[in-house]
Image (cartoon, rainbow, N blue to C red):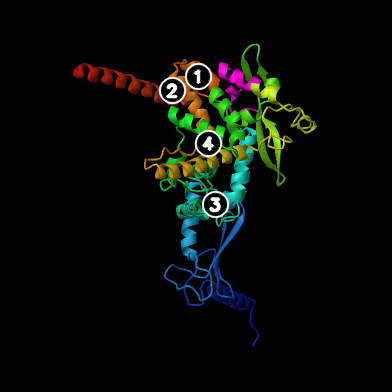
Amino acid sequence: MVLSEYHIKALFHFKEERQMGARRRDNKGRILKDGESQRDDGRYMYRYQSPDGTRKTIYSWRLVETDSHPAGKKKELSLREMEVAIQKDLMDGININGASVTLNELFLKYIRTKKRLKSNVKDNYVCLYNKHVKDSLIGNRLVKDIRKIDILNLYATISDSGLSNGTIHIIHNNILSPMFQMAVDNDWIRKNPSEKCLKEYPHDPLNRREALSSEEEKIFLNFLEKDNVYSKYLPIVELVLETALRRGEILGLTWKDVDFKKGFLYIDHQLQYCSTGGKYIFRIGTPKTDLGKRAVPLSKKAVLLLKNLKEKEDFNSLRSQVSIDGYRNFIFLNGQKNNVLIPRQFGDGLVAACKKYNKEETRLADRENRGPKLLPIITPHILRHTACTRMAEAGIDIKVLQTIMGHKTVDLTMNIYNHADLERVKREFTKADNRESACLLG
């Protein structure tokens, strides 16, 4: 039997429709939607076009949510659930291509935009991220797949490893939260998963940034003066308490910065210890804020302290060789006099000194059957805060105090100034209360 051209075309059409129908159903006989198909291995796939014209494909071992997960296969959303999420993102203008970046890739994009950050601050952020986030469970996760619980788990993990709550706050407020917000602002993700993730991580009361009382200050200075190990930090501590310099500023001081004739310290740089190419090196950076370049007046005690250091200074060959970015004749060097002090070493030394004093004081108090006079954890910042408080208690004008501190805004200074003012009010009220009691007794 010879088929006509019409019958040949009709037969071919019927065969093609039947094949199309077969492709439009899965191995369970369910009709598949446009863009959906099922591969020979049973896995479902969906092809679609992103707003920029790029062809995209997603995969799942399940077609709908009620399908069971195949044994031995990764648990994931069903294909239809994925399609709904994609369509919602497209309707809401979410940039699907942007959401495909990993957290580590997002960090590189974020840190590249921070042109106004000082180099030492940026280096610190990079160091913190690489050390605590990059190789974590979320480092190579897609940004769109990271949830609040993932960030909470990260903070719990690094907290259990011994990282302070203060550092966790820095990682959150200065790195992760603004990173995710950048992704939100660019329509890469719908919402910031780091929002309200710090509720479980308040600042540690032991590390609160409060000034030492006058009594605590005297106790700490007396301990440093007598202790064989930590007495090396006494001149630095004393000068910080007289000038309120930051840690990098005090350790980066050179004799060229001291003007005995006019009675000023000129601050225009600070010492930094940063990781460059996987290796830590010293370098000189600019002060923390734009107002950090300043002239700090020297008290009589500060002048006497510096002159005593100058007289005792040993100008040996090793000292003369210490040079960092063209800066020489540093006032404070390490025990070997062959290099400057590592900033972190100074901070750790203060903490260790406090712990040693508290241990000895507890033992002595037990022996003398009295309550111990313990010190809080003391850091370089607390010393700076203490110096500012003493100046405020002495009645130094708030704007003058802002200049001495190098604070960017007067609000920062006011927080300390108001606290000191309240202490003065309390002392004056106590005096009045004592006078009233004396009158009643008389």
Q: Which residue in the protein does label 3 denote?
A: 143
Q: Residue at x 49, y 16 (%)?
A: 399
Amino acid under label 1?
Leu
Amino acid under label 4?
Thr
Please tell me the numbered disc located at residue 3.
Answer: none
Mark 2: secondary structure: helix
Please tell me the numbered disc located at residue 401.
Answer: 1
Q: Is residue 187 magenta?
A: no
- Nearer to us of marks 4 and 1 is 4
- Nearer to us of marks 3 and 4 is 4
Q: Position of residue 369 (x, y in %)?
A: 37, 43
Label 3 to label 1, Cα distance in Å?
45 Å
Label 2 to label 1, Cα distance in Å?
9 Å
Q: Marks 4 and 1: CB-CB under 8 Å?
A: no
Q: Which residue in the protein does label 4 denote?
A: 379
- Nearer to us of marks 3 and 2 is 2
Q: Is residue 74 above or below residue 262?
A: below
Q: Is residue 291 above or below residue 227?
A: above
* Residue interval drawn in magenta: 286-307
Q: Is residue 365 above or below residue 292?
A: below
Label 3 to label 4, Cα distance in Å?
37 Å
Which mark sits nearer the N-terminus, 4 or 2? 4
Q: Is residue 97 visible?
A: no
Amino acid under label 3?
Val
Q: Mark 1: few, some, or many residues within 10 Å (few <14, many ≥20)? A: many
Q: Residue at x 63, y 21 (%)?
A: 306
**Depth order, front residue of 142/156:** 156
Mark 1: secondary structure: helix
Q: Marks 4 and 2: CB-CB under 8 Å?
A: no
Please tell me the numbered disc located at residue 417.
Answer: 2
Q: Mark 3: few, some, or many residues within 10 Å (few <14, many ≥20)? A: many
